[in-house]
Amino acid sequence: MAERTGSKAKVDTVAGESRVEAAEAAALVVREDEDPWTEEELTEVRELLMSDVERLRDEINDAEADIADLLRSGDTGGEDQADTGTKTFEREHEMSLAANHRDMLVQTERALGRIENGTYGVCESCGKPIGKARLQAFPRATLCMTCKQRQERR
């Protein structure tokens, strides 16, 4: 009997979480010409963002390991200027990649936070809906197309 109660409790918890996620999805802002977010669509975006977080963390770790290797082999005694220049270029390239990955990681974690706090899909500049199609194509978007175009013209 205890197992049966335990199983029912798990089913109730799963069903309760499902209802919360469905309500969470439906509460997100969309443009007037779009259907509300479904639980499945939001789950897909969330899973994509979470996999991006893992991938970006791995890439940052790899880039930092490469930078450390390049710094360790930084002894330039006996090398000509071309070899020294190549090592410097490689190190700066790896540092640039790591910085870009860190920026993308921050944006991705921020998007996940916006999903959790219910502000996902709201333009951070004008407060209007970003658009579900835009978010499905670029889940880290924080600006609607109008504001993004305005920002890029500056």
Image (tube, helix red, strand yellow):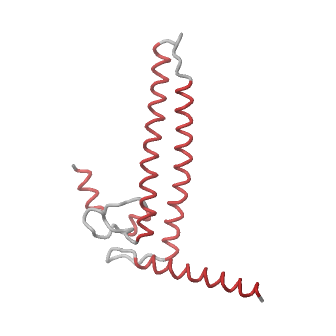
- Asked if residue 138 shows in the view, the reply is no
- Asked if residue 54 shows in the view, the reply is yes
Residue extending furthest top?
78
Q: Depth check: give the residue in front, 90 or 68.
A: 68
- 76 is higher (above) or lower (below) than 131: above
Q: Residue visible at 52% across and 82% down?
A: 19
The quarter of the picture where the N terminus appears is: bottom right
Q: Is residue 132 left or right of residue 46?
A: left
Q: Is residue 61 left or right of residue 81?
A: right
> How far from the left and from the top, in percent, is residue 18?
55, 79
Count of residue discs: 0
Residue extending furthest bottom?
1
Q: Depth check: give the residue in front, 64 or 86.
A: 64
Q: Is residue 152 left or right of residue 14?
A: left
> How far from the left and from the top, in percent, is residue 71?
52, 27
Q: Depth check: give the residue in front, 89 or 2.
A: 2
Q: Residue visible at 21% across and 49% down?
A: 154
Q: Residue visible at 57% across and 29% down?
A: 69
> How far from the left and from the top, in percent, is residue 113?
43, 64
Q: Residue visible at 46% across and 14% down?
A: 81
> How far from the left and from the top, in percent, is residue 32?
31, 77
Q: Quadrant of residue 66?
A: top right
